[in-house]
Amino acid sequence: MNNTDSEYIIEVEDLVVQYGTRSVLDGISFKVKRGEIFVILGGSGCGKSTLLRTLVGLLQPQSGKICMFGKDVTKMSDKEQIELRKSIGMCFQNSALFNSMTVGENVALPLKEHTHLADSTIEIMTQIKLDLVGLSGCANLYPSQLSGGMRKRAGIARAMALDPEIIFYDEPSSGLDPIVAAGLDQLIRKMQNTFNLTSVVVTHDLESVQIIADRVCLLNEGKIVAIGELKDMEANNDPYLRQFFTRTPNIEENQHTSVILD
Amino acid sequence: MIVQLLGYIGSKFLNGLHSSLVVCVLIMDTLNWLFYQPLKGRGLRWRNAVEYIVEYGFHSIPIVGLISLLIGLIMGMQFAYTLQQWGVTIFMADIISIAALRELAPLMSAILITGRSGSAITAEIGTMKVSEEIDALMVMGLNPVKFLIVPKFLGMIIAVPCVTILSMLIMIAGGFIVAVGILGMDFWTYFNQTAGAIISKDLFSGMIKSVFFGLTICWVGVYRGFQVESSAESVGKMTTSSVVTSIFTIIIVDLIWTTLFYFTD
């Protein structure tokens, strides 16, 4: 990718995504700086996963602009998109490893398909990536033989296979015990420090936000409530934001309506 | 009442139209990645295709072989019983070979492979969709059609005709067992009668059909797989639906080709 020297690596402008006639994202705009960890926070059903899927090109927006590396992703040709996909990586919520392949084969797959490297080189590179995430001895295991945390780590190794510049994480700590989740937070930090990776993390886990976030954006009902550094968030008095950060439940009658809205 | 009925028929019709459009797109995509893209230097996954040929073809030989043999025996006994009333038992050779070549071998092979592998295709793709593996492929810049469908497609259109030829031979052999083993006919008389009955058009029409049956099994399986919504229950539902739709479509395709081959000039 030919990089412009712009400070921002991802720029999203007025993004609208609809399922049928229902708006899931309604006029989202934000910018992600090169080399930072940008966290997208929000409750269930607020559209944060939809936002992530739109960013990586799995969903087409109805309108708006997504620029990565200074190019509009929504107007790219197929070929340009494939080139772009080589410089981004994504870790899925349930890690989405290919169950019919071993962990090593999973990590080697992008290398095999997108490069012309010799098999021996690919094997070494796979080993390096697995060492990086702390799964040194697991290359010949199948995903079903791994624990949840190990699977997420393997997912990160696969996303890192082509040395991307941006990496997207979908709920990295969901379904993990606190110790494993903390380890994963550390890993996300380490990746960013070592490779100057830009990371976009979708989560609702406030504790991991404290550890990993450089900047945070809070979503509610398809709109951005607040955006900025964590300390700005603490100073912000928006009622939803306060409720979210203090973990206050909805009062009874509101709870009923929110269930319907979900 | 009438309005409701018309509405029901209309919505069913529109649904059908929509799914046939989706299937058409799928077919175009498959052909694109099978013929056009490899010319532009984006390779075919041959090794996977060979694995699928072994899985769909070689591994289905025992069951297809056994069933073909049993059907050959059944046909032999039925025709021998009927024909001996006129004393022309020898004609069972003609009937069995024509029935096997034109209809029974292609149909039985296709239906058995639908049950074995058509369902497996749907379940595989459906499960991959539920566990976001398809999305993972797309994010990696790997085309699911090239990666998942084209190898299966190649596997099917090669495996089904091969299995069909074998099934034809075994069905005819079943007839031999009844005629020579049970009824005590002379082997060479029966052999010559069979050889005289087989014409290349029968073989040809059977083979053409089996190729199209292979296409049907693959596309219906893949289409149903992609229809899976994100739940395990939906995988089961679509797998069942894949087998039913596939068998139904195979019969329709059979009807069309039979009409083309034998009832048009």
Image: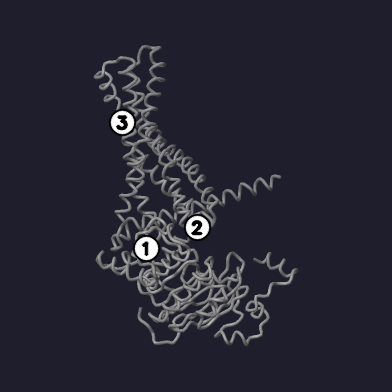
Q: Are marks 2 and 1 in contact (CB under 8 Å)?
A: no
Disc on res. B130 = 2
- Amino acid identity at mark 2: Val
Q: In the rendered view, would you say A26 is above or below B98?
A: below
Disc on res. A50 = none
- Amino acid identity at mark 3: Leu
Q: Name the spot of residue B198 as percent of width and height, x first.
A: 29, 28
Q: How is the image coloured?
A: one colour
Q: Name the spot of residue A64 as percent of width and height, x first.
A: 52, 76
Cα distance, mark 1 to mark 3? 49 Å
Of residues A181 and B59, the one nearer the viewer is: A181
Cα distance, mark 3 to mark 2? 42 Å
Q: Which residue is mark 1?
A: A138
Residue mark closest to the camera, 2 vs 1: 1
Q: Which residue is mark 3?
A: B169
Q: Are marks 1 and 3 in contact (CB under 8 Å)?
A: no
- Amino acid identity at mark 1: Cys
